[in-house]
Amino acid sequence: MIFNNIAVIPNEKKDPFFTNTKNLANYLSEKADKSGENIRIYADIVHQEKFCGRNINKVNFVCENDLYKTCNLLIVLGGDGTILKIASKASVFNIPVIGVNLGRIGFMSDIEVDEINLLDGLFSGNYKIEERMMINVEIIKQNGKTAEYAGSALNDAVITNGALSRLIEIDLVCDNIKITHYRADGVIIATPTGSTAYSMSAGGPVIDPNIECFCVTPICPHSFINRPIIFSHDSILEVANRSMNSDVYLTVDGQINVKLDVNDTVRIKKSKFVTKLIAIKKHGFFDVIRAKISDN
Protein backbone atom coordinates (compact mmCIF):
# COMPACT_ATOMS: atom_id res chain seq x y z
CA MET A 1 0.00 0.00 0.00
CA ILE A 2 1.34 3.44 -0.94
CA PHE A 3 0.81 6.12 1.71
CA ASN A 4 0.85 9.43 -0.11
CA ASN A 5 -1.94 11.42 1.58
CA ILE A 6 -1.02 11.46 5.25
CA ALA A 7 -2.98 13.15 8.02
CA VAL A 8 -1.16 14.36 11.13
CA ILE A 9 -3.46 14.26 14.18
CA PRO A 10 -1.93 16.44 16.92
CA ASN A 11 -2.64 16.38 20.65
CA GLU A 12 -2.86 19.90 22.03
CA LYS A 13 -2.98 18.69 25.63
CA LYS A 14 0.14 16.51 25.53
CA ASP A 15 1.98 18.58 22.92
CA PRO A 16 0.81 22.14 23.74
CA PHE A 17 3.61 23.88 21.84
CA PHE A 18 3.34 21.46 18.90
CA THR A 19 7.03 20.57 19.26
CA ASN A 20 6.47 16.89 18.50
CA THR A 21 3.92 17.74 15.82
CA LYS A 22 6.51 19.92 14.10
CA ASN A 23 9.14 17.17 14.30
CA LEU A 24 6.73 14.73 12.68
CA ALA A 25 5.68 17.15 9.91
CA ASN A 26 9.34 18.02 9.21
CA TYR A 27 10.21 14.32 9.04
CA LEU A 28 7.46 13.70 6.48
CA SER A 29 8.48 16.75 4.42
CA GLU A 30 12.13 15.69 4.40
CA LYS A 31 11.12 12.14 3.51
CA ALA A 32 9.19 13.45 0.50
CA ASP A 33 12.06 15.69 -0.61
CA LYS A 34 14.78 13.03 -0.30
CA SER A 35 12.86 10.12 -1.77
CA GLY A 36 10.98 12.00 -4.45
CA GLU A 37 7.80 10.40 -3.14
CA ASN A 38 4.63 12.34 -3.80
CA ILE A 39 3.75 12.67 -0.12
CA ARG A 40 1.13 15.24 0.84
CA ILE A 41 0.60 16.18 4.49
CA TYR A 42 -2.84 17.11 5.79
CA ALA A 43 -4.25 18.43 9.06
CA ASP A 44 -7.63 19.51 10.36
CA ILE A 45 -8.27 23.19 9.65
CA VAL A 46 -9.09 23.79 13.32
CA HIS A 47 -5.35 23.45 14.02
CA GLN A 48 -4.21 25.80 11.24
CA GLU A 49 -3.41 28.71 13.54
CA LYS A 50 -1.23 26.55 15.79
CA PHE A 51 0.59 25.00 12.83
CA CYS A 52 1.31 28.38 11.28
CA GLY A 53 2.32 29.85 14.64
CA ARG A 54 4.95 27.12 15.00
CA ASN A 55 6.11 27.55 11.38
CA ILE A 56 4.98 24.05 10.45
CA ASN A 57 4.98 24.31 6.69
CA LYS A 58 3.94 22.26 3.66
CA VAL A 59 0.68 21.21 5.30
CA ASN A 60 -2.72 21.20 3.59
CA PHE A 61 -5.60 22.21 5.87
CA VAL A 62 -9.06 20.77 5.29
CA CYS A 63 -12.20 20.27 7.34
CA GLU A 64 -12.50 17.06 9.36
CA ASN A 65 -14.78 15.25 6.91
CA ASP A 66 -12.50 16.03 3.97
CA LEU A 67 -9.52 14.85 6.02
CA TYR A 68 -11.01 11.36 6.24
CA LYS A 69 -12.16 11.38 2.62
CA THR A 70 -8.75 12.47 1.32
CA CYS A 71 -6.14 10.69 3.42
CA ASN A 72 -5.07 7.05 3.33
CA LEU A 73 -3.06 7.11 6.56
CA LEU A 74 -3.55 8.75 9.96
CA ILE A 75 -0.53 9.38 12.17
CA VAL A 76 -1.82 10.09 15.65
CA LEU A 77 0.25 11.87 18.29
CA GLY A 78 -0.77 11.05 21.84
CA GLY A 79 -1.78 7.96 23.77
CA ASP A 80 -4.54 5.40 23.44
CA GLY A 81 -7.17 8.02 24.24
CA THR A 82 -6.24 10.01 21.15
CA ILE A 83 -6.53 6.91 18.97
CA LEU A 84 -9.93 6.12 20.51
CA LYS A 85 -11.17 9.59 19.56
CA ILE A 86 -10.56 8.97 15.86
CA ALA A 87 -10.97 5.18 15.68
CA SER A 88 -14.70 5.16 14.92
CA LYS A 89 -14.44 7.57 12.00
CA ALA A 90 -11.22 6.01 10.68
CA SER A 91 -12.92 2.61 10.65
CA VAL A 92 -15.87 3.90 8.59
CA PHE A 93 -13.46 5.30 5.98
CA ASN A 94 -11.24 2.20 6.19
CA ILE A 95 -8.12 4.25 6.98
CA PRO A 96 -5.20 2.63 8.81
CA VAL A 97 -3.84 4.35 11.90
CA ILE A 98 -0.42 4.44 13.52
CA GLY A 99 0.12 5.98 16.93
CA VAL A 100 3.13 7.91 18.21
CA ASN A 101 3.01 7.59 21.98
CA LEU A 102 3.09 10.76 24.07
CA GLY A 103 1.13 9.18 26.90
CA ARG A 104 2.01 6.93 29.80
CA ILE A 105 1.40 3.41 28.49
CA GLY A 106 0.04 3.55 24.96
CA PHE A 107 -0.87 -0.07 24.18
CA MET A 108 -2.13 0.89 20.73
CA SER A 109 0.66 3.33 19.88
CA ASP A 110 3.31 1.40 17.99
CA ILE A 111 6.22 3.80 18.36
CA GLU A 112 7.48 6.23 20.98
CA VAL A 113 7.97 9.92 20.33
CA ASP A 114 11.76 9.50 20.05
CA GLU A 115 11.37 6.79 17.40
CA ILE A 116 9.95 8.88 14.55
CA ASN A 117 12.58 7.53 12.16
CA LEU A 118 10.98 4.10 12.45
CA LEU A 119 8.21 5.50 10.24
CA ASP A 120 10.63 4.75 7.38
CA GLY A 121 9.01 1.31 7.47
CA LEU A 122 5.77 2.81 6.13
CA PHE A 123 7.52 3.69 2.87
CA SER A 124 9.66 0.57 2.54
CA GLY A 125 6.79 -1.85 3.17
CA ASN A 126 8.19 -3.04 6.49
CA TYR A 127 4.94 -2.99 8.43
CA LYS A 128 1.82 -5.01 9.01
CA ILE A 129 -1.80 -3.98 9.48
CA GLU A 130 -3.69 -5.45 12.42
CA GLU A 131 -7.47 -5.46 12.17
CA ARG A 132 -9.03 -4.90 15.59
CA MET A 133 -12.58 -5.95 16.29
CA MET A 134 -15.03 -3.21 17.29
CA ILE A 135 -18.45 -3.29 18.91
CA ASN A 136 -21.68 -1.60 17.87
CA VAL A 137 -23.47 0.09 20.77
CA GLU A 138 -27.06 1.30 20.77
CA ILE A 139 -29.63 2.27 23.37
CA ILE A 140 -33.10 0.71 23.18
CA LYS A 141 -35.84 2.61 25.00
CA GLN A 142 -38.59 0.90 26.99
CA ASN A 143 -41.00 1.31 24.07
CA GLY A 144 -38.61 -0.68 21.85
CA LYS A 145 -37.41 2.29 19.83
CA THR A 146 -33.72 2.98 19.34
CA ALA A 147 -32.53 6.14 21.09
CA GLU A 148 -30.68 8.92 19.31
CA TYR A 149 -27.28 7.55 20.27
CA ALA A 150 -25.81 4.65 18.34
CA GLY A 151 -22.15 4.19 17.53
CA SER A 152 -19.14 1.91 17.56
CA ALA A 153 -16.32 1.41 20.03
CA LEU A 154 -12.83 0.00 19.83
CA ASN A 155 -12.27 -0.46 23.57
CA ASP A 156 -15.41 -0.73 25.63
CA ALA A 157 -18.88 0.31 26.66
CA VAL A 158 -19.27 1.01 30.38
CA ILE A 159 -22.52 1.25 32.30
CA THR A 160 -21.93 2.83 35.68
CA ASN A 161 -23.37 4.96 38.46
CA GLY A 162 -23.36 8.75 38.45
CA ALA A 163 -22.00 11.23 40.96
CA LEU A 164 -23.34 9.41 44.03
CA SER A 165 -21.58 6.27 45.21
CA ARG A 166 -24.48 3.83 44.99
CA LEU A 167 -24.84 0.31 43.69
CA ILE A 168 -26.86 0.04 40.51
CA GLU A 169 -29.13 -2.79 39.37
CA ILE A 170 -28.36 -4.33 35.97
CA ASP A 171 -29.68 -7.34 34.05
CA LEU A 172 -27.35 -9.05 31.57
CA VAL A 173 -28.95 -10.93 28.66
CA CYS A 174 -27.19 -12.82 25.85
CA ASP A 175 -29.13 -13.88 22.74
CA ASN A 176 -32.43 -13.42 24.62
CA ILE A 177 -31.28 -15.61 27.52
CA LYS A 178 -30.88 -13.96 30.92
CA ILE A 179 -27.36 -14.56 32.20
CA THR A 180 -27.31 -12.78 35.55
CA HIS A 181 -28.41 -9.80 37.60
CA TYR A 182 -25.73 -7.47 38.92
CA ARG A 183 -25.76 -5.24 41.97
CA ALA A 184 -22.53 -3.40 41.42
CA ASP A 185 -20.90 -0.06 40.73
CA GLY A 186 -21.31 -0.90 37.06
CA VAL A 187 -20.33 -3.26 34.28
CA ILE A 188 -17.76 -3.12 31.45
CA ILE A 189 -18.28 -4.75 28.07
CA ALA A 190 -14.85 -4.83 26.46
CA THR A 191 -13.37 -5.94 23.17
CA PRO A 192 -10.06 -7.84 23.22
CA THR A 193 -8.33 -4.51 22.51
CA GLY A 194 -10.15 -2.96 25.46
CA SER A 195 -9.30 -5.87 27.75
CA THR A 196 -6.07 -4.11 28.77
CA ALA A 197 -7.89 -0.91 29.74
CA TYR A 198 -10.62 -0.37 32.37
CA SER A 199 -11.66 -4.02 32.24
CA MET A 200 -8.21 -5.18 33.35
CA SER A 201 -8.23 -2.67 36.22
CA ALA A 202 -11.58 -4.12 37.33
CA GLY A 203 -10.19 -7.67 37.39
CA GLY A 204 -11.03 -8.75 33.85
CA PRO A 205 -8.76 -11.05 31.81
CA VAL A 206 -6.20 -9.89 29.27
CA ILE A 207 -7.33 -11.15 25.86
CA ASP A 208 -5.18 -11.58 22.76
CA PRO A 209 -6.62 -9.14 20.17
CA ASN A 210 -6.47 -11.89 17.53
CA ILE A 211 -9.36 -13.55 19.38
CA GLU A 212 -12.80 -12.15 18.58
CA CYS A 213 -15.05 -12.05 21.64
CA PHE A 214 -16.67 -9.84 24.26
CA CYS A 215 -15.66 -9.71 27.91
CA VAL A 216 -18.22 -8.62 30.50
CA THR A 217 -16.61 -7.51 33.76
CA PRO A 218 -18.64 -6.28 36.76
CA ILE A 219 -17.23 -3.33 38.69
CA CYS A 220 -17.13 -4.04 42.44
CA PRO A 221 -20.08 -6.48 42.44
CA HIS A 222 -21.89 -7.01 45.72
CA SER A 223 -21.54 -10.78 45.41
CA PHE A 224 -19.16 -13.65 46.11
CA ILE A 225 -19.73 -15.33 42.76
CA ASN A 226 -19.94 -12.69 40.00
CA ARG A 227 -16.88 -12.97 37.81
CA PRO A 228 -15.93 -11.77 34.31
CA ILE A 229 -17.63 -13.72 31.51
CA ILE A 230 -16.38 -14.23 27.94
CA PHE A 231 -18.96 -14.32 25.14
CA SER A 232 -18.62 -15.31 21.50
CA HIS A 233 -18.21 -12.48 18.97
CA ASP A 234 -21.48 -13.42 17.27
CA SER A 235 -23.50 -12.97 20.47
CA ILE A 236 -25.90 -10.09 21.00
CA LEU A 237 -25.59 -8.72 24.52
CA GLU A 238 -28.19 -6.61 26.26
CA VAL A 239 -27.55 -4.74 29.50
CA ALA A 240 -30.77 -3.40 31.04
CA ASN A 241 -30.84 -0.62 33.63
CA ARG A 242 -33.09 -1.70 36.52
CA SER A 243 -32.01 1.04 38.94
CA MET A 244 -34.93 3.02 40.34
CA ASN A 245 -33.02 5.40 42.61
CA SER A 246 -29.66 5.95 40.92
CA ASP A 247 -28.37 7.93 37.98
CA VAL A 248 -26.90 5.49 35.46
CA TYR A 249 -24.69 6.41 32.51
CA LEU A 250 -23.34 4.73 29.41
CA THR A 251 -19.78 5.71 28.47
CA VAL A 252 -18.39 4.61 25.11
CA ASP A 253 -14.60 4.43 24.68
CA GLY A 254 -14.23 7.05 27.41
CA GLN A 255 -15.39 9.67 24.89
CA ILE A 256 -19.20 9.68 24.84
CA ASN A 257 -21.40 9.83 27.93
CA VAL A 258 -25.19 9.24 27.80
CA LYS A 259 -27.61 9.11 30.73
CA LEU A 260 -29.81 6.02 30.80
CA ASP A 261 -33.43 6.03 31.92
CA VAL A 262 -34.89 3.24 34.01
CA ASN A 263 -35.41 0.12 31.84
CA ASP A 264 -33.28 1.46 29.02
CA THR A 265 -31.31 -1.36 27.42
CA VAL A 266 -27.83 -1.07 25.95
CA ARG A 267 -27.53 -3.52 23.06
CA ILE A 268 -24.04 -4.57 22.01
CA LYS A 269 -22.91 -6.68 19.09
CA LYS A 270 -19.89 -7.03 16.85
CA SER A 271 -19.49 -4.06 14.51
CA LYS A 272 -19.17 -4.50 10.77
CA PHE A 273 -16.22 -2.09 10.96
CA VAL A 274 -12.70 -2.74 12.20
CA THR A 275 -9.92 -0.44 13.32
CA LYS A 276 -6.76 -0.95 11.28
CA LEU A 277 -3.67 -0.41 13.42
CA ILE A 278 -0.27 -0.32 11.77
CA ALA A 279 2.62 -2.11 13.47
CA ILE A 280 6.18 -1.42 12.39
CA LYS A 281 8.04 -2.95 15.29
CA LYS A 282 8.37 -6.72 15.12
CA HIS A 283 6.88 -7.62 18.46
CA GLY A 284 3.93 -9.64 19.61
CA PHE A 285 1.01 -8.65 21.79
CA PHE A 286 2.47 -10.17 24.95
CA ASP A 287 5.83 -8.52 24.28
CA VAL A 288 3.95 -5.22 24.50
CA ILE A 289 2.16 -6.31 27.68
CA ARG A 290 5.42 -7.32 29.31
CA ALA A 291 7.20 -4.11 28.26
CA LYS A 292 4.39 -1.72 29.16
CA ILE A 293 2.95 -3.03 32.43
CA SER A 294 5.02 -5.92 33.75
CA ASP A 295 7.03 -5.43 36.91
CA ASN A 296 9.72 -7.77 35.54
Image (tube, rainbow, N blue to C red):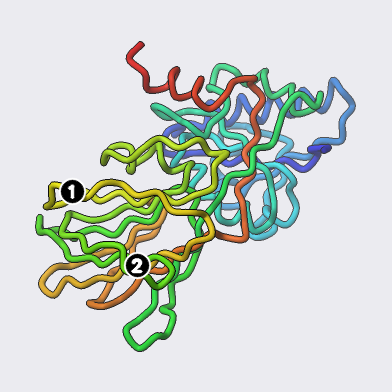
Per the image, the residue denoted by label 2 is 173
Q: What residue type is labelled 2?
A: Val
Residue 17 in the image, given as x and y percentages of width and height: 47, 31
Residue 52 in sight here: no
Residue 245 in sight here: yes
Residue 178 in the image, given as x and y percentages of width and height: 31, 68
Q: Is residue 35 left or right of residue 156?
A: right
The dot on residue 7 is none
Where 272 falls versus 149 (above or below)? above
Where 93 falls versus 288 (above or below)? below
Where 5 falls versus 245 (above or below)? above
Are the residues at dot 2 and dot 1 in contact (C-beta closer than 8 Å)? Answer: no
Tag in front: 2 or 1: 1
- Tell me the residue at 25%/46% (across/down): 227
Figure disc tally:
2
Q: Compare marks 2 and 1 and give the one earlier in the sequence.
A: 2
Residue lying furthest bottom: 143
User: In front here: 5 or 136?
Assistant: 136
- Tell me the residue at 38%/56% (across/down): 157
Residue lying furthest right: 36
Q: In this view, does 254 lie to the left or right of 261?
A: right
Residue 185 in the image, given as x and y percentages of width and height: 18, 54
Residue 41 in the image, given as x and y percentages of width and height: 73, 39
- Tell me the residue at 43%/69% (across/down): 175
The dot on residue 225 is 1
